[in-house]
Amino acid sequence: MSTPTPSTAGAQQPKVAVRGLYKRFDGAAINALEHIDLDIGANEFVTFVGASGCGKSTLLRTIGGLEVQTAGELLVDGRAVSGPGIDRAMVFQHYSLYPWMTVLENIKFCRQLAAHTKDRTSSDVEAASGRADALLRLMGLQNVAGAWPNQLSGGMQQRVAIARALMGRPDIVLMDEPFGALDAQTREVMHDLIRYVHRLEKATIVFVTHDVEEALYLGQRVVLMAPRPGRIDTIYDVPFGDQRTQDLKHAPEFLSLKRDILDRIRETSGMKTDLEQLQRLSGATAETL
Amino acid sequence: MSQTLPPAAQAIVPVARAPAVPRRRSNLWTVRAPISRRAYWVLALTGLVTPLLLWTVLAAWGGMDATFLPAPLQVLDRTWTWATETGLMGDMGISVYRVVAGFLLSAVIALPLGLLIGSYRAVQALLEPLTDFIRYMPAVAFIPLVMLWIGIGEGSKIAIIFIGTFFQMVLMVAEDVRRVPAAQVEAAQTMGANRRELIEKVIFPSAKPALLDTLRITMGWAWTYLVVAELVAANSGLGYAILRAQRFLQTDTIFAGIIVIGLIGLVTDQLFRLAHRRAFPWLYLKG
């Protein structure tokens, strides 16, 4: 199923368009991102995987406006990105919640910002408080609304972070390994939750992970990136439709696609040669012994 | 852990015993292991009382001249006469005033400045090397200049304490601000916070607990500069009393003065810790 298609956005304007994008950090010898071309459609759920150093997080942060590209174009809704904006909310792996605020205050944080309260009518305020309640319920946080973040487990904290990102109704949610620090069971629950959120909120989700199973289970497309220099290697269209359950993770076609992707990551990361070297080395040691 | 059970119970309990857990020694010598509250207080009191006992013993039977080492009771007596006859309260009052004034003055300037240094690389580049340079200069050496510029009134004493604390404080505040997790700042940026909102609603509140700790620590340093400050034409104050006692070899007064300063410091420190617990309850959650 590994057809390297550069774009599947269709006739309408892509939500995010990346054109010949380069990024090189100050003093670095290799491009962190090299010639990235990619379209992401509205309401798409696209996941990024790749060996460490492949630039997947850098690309995500560039879309979020937290990094500036060295060359190339980055368009959101056809307009060039010039920094962070309320149309693109970001969820981080950890340490992003405000420990001095309760869960509910964290979720409503954007209501304190001028960018979200330009037309502050009473119906607007009412709608916002309704939204916060709805998000609490959606994320299963009703019982901890008054708690402080560090009273919560890692999984619950990430629910708060996601709710807070959704509060401002962003068009695009950028997620940088949001479940990377969670245990396997919690992660499974979060997977179904975030898929539900995607259907409900009609947001575009760009999701970076190092876990291939996660990328395949969540994504409509999986973008595989390769390191040194960071580039797009292969784009996989995930053929499992939108109705997915945890059982899918054991289906043969899921497993074979997962194996393809894992093999490709290994090839691009040079891990295979590491293994060969190790075998050669242990052979040499066996001889000397 | 052998335990004799009544016959009836022995019948119920399966014959095979759980493998004996090797008894661990007490936690006192396990790296980073918690100790009981009782153990804490016993050790803390031992730490405080032992030097006092040693001092008593040494003063009584060490064959030392009282000029070199006055006995604890003698110091206590001296403190009492100082308090009742020679104006200890006045000395304490004026010294607390000088320390607090110097400390507040430097806090009022260091907090916003450190916030800017920690938030903007440009301000950091402009001011941090200079601050680093000045903070190595000994505050004592500024005395002649301070006398020349400010004179010999209260201002000069406050200025010395200011010089001693301000430059350290700026750097510590800047460091506290830099330690605010990047994800907290970036999350706010992607939610649309502008520069002012970032500093007011994220960076400052996030750094607050660390800032209060910095104030607590620098308050201690302000007290250590008191004696230096009261070298400048003072005629009252704890530091001045110590300096005068030195001239007349009144070792008991020197001891008394040092201990009074130490006690004031201890009380201030505990007040800061209490305020910390009150202001930032989420840092002290149990479980």
Image (cartoon, coloured by chain):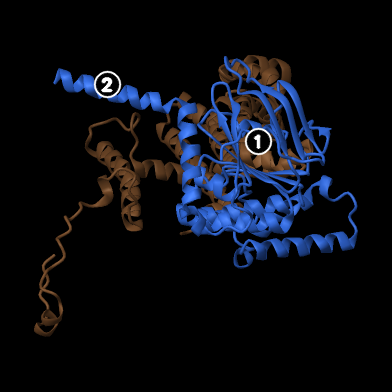
Of mark 1 and mark 2, the one earlier in the sequence is: 1
User: Quarter-wise, where is residue A206 in the image?
Assistant: top right
The answer to which of B35 and B264 lies nearer the viewer is: B35
Figure colour of chain A: blue
Compared with residue B134, is residue A182 higher up or lower down, i.e. above or below? Answer: below
Q: Image point 78% across, 44% down: which residue?
A: A87
Does the rendering let one see residue B263? no
Q: Quadrant of the N terminus of chain A?
A: top right
User: Within 10 angstroms of label 2, few (less than 14), some, or many (20 or more) residues?
Assistant: few
For this view, does B8 lie left or right of residue B187?
Answer: left
Q: Residue B143's spot in the image, x, y percent?
A: 62, 18
Q: Image point 33% across, 52% down: which residue?
A: B35
* Chain for colour brown: B
User: Within 10 angstroms of label 1, few (less than 14), some, or many (20 or more) residues?
Assistant: many
Q: Which mark is residue A277?
A: none
Compared with residue B273, is residue A144 higher up or lower down, i.e. above or below? Answer: below
Alpha carbons under labels 1 and 2: distance apart? 39 Å
Can marks 1 and 2 be said to lie on one chain? yes
Q: Image point 57% across, 14% down: which residue?
A: A29
The answer to which of A200 and A232 lies nearer the viewer is: A232
Which residue lies most toward the bottom here?
A: B8
Q: Which amino acid type is shown beneath numbered disc 1?
A: Leu
Q: Residue B75's spot in the image, x, y percent?
A: 40, 41
For this view, does A208 lie left or right of residue A106?
Answer: left
User: Quarter-wise, where is residue B39 in the image?
Assistant: bottom left
Does the rendering let one see residue B250? yes
Kindly identify which residue carries mark 2. A281
Kindly identify which residue carries mark 1. A60
Q: Image point 23% across, 32% down: which residue?
A: B63
For this view, does B228 lie left or right of residue A69?
Answer: left
The answer to which of A132 and B172 lies nearer the viewer is: A132
Which type of secondary structure does the marked residue at label 2 adopt?
helix
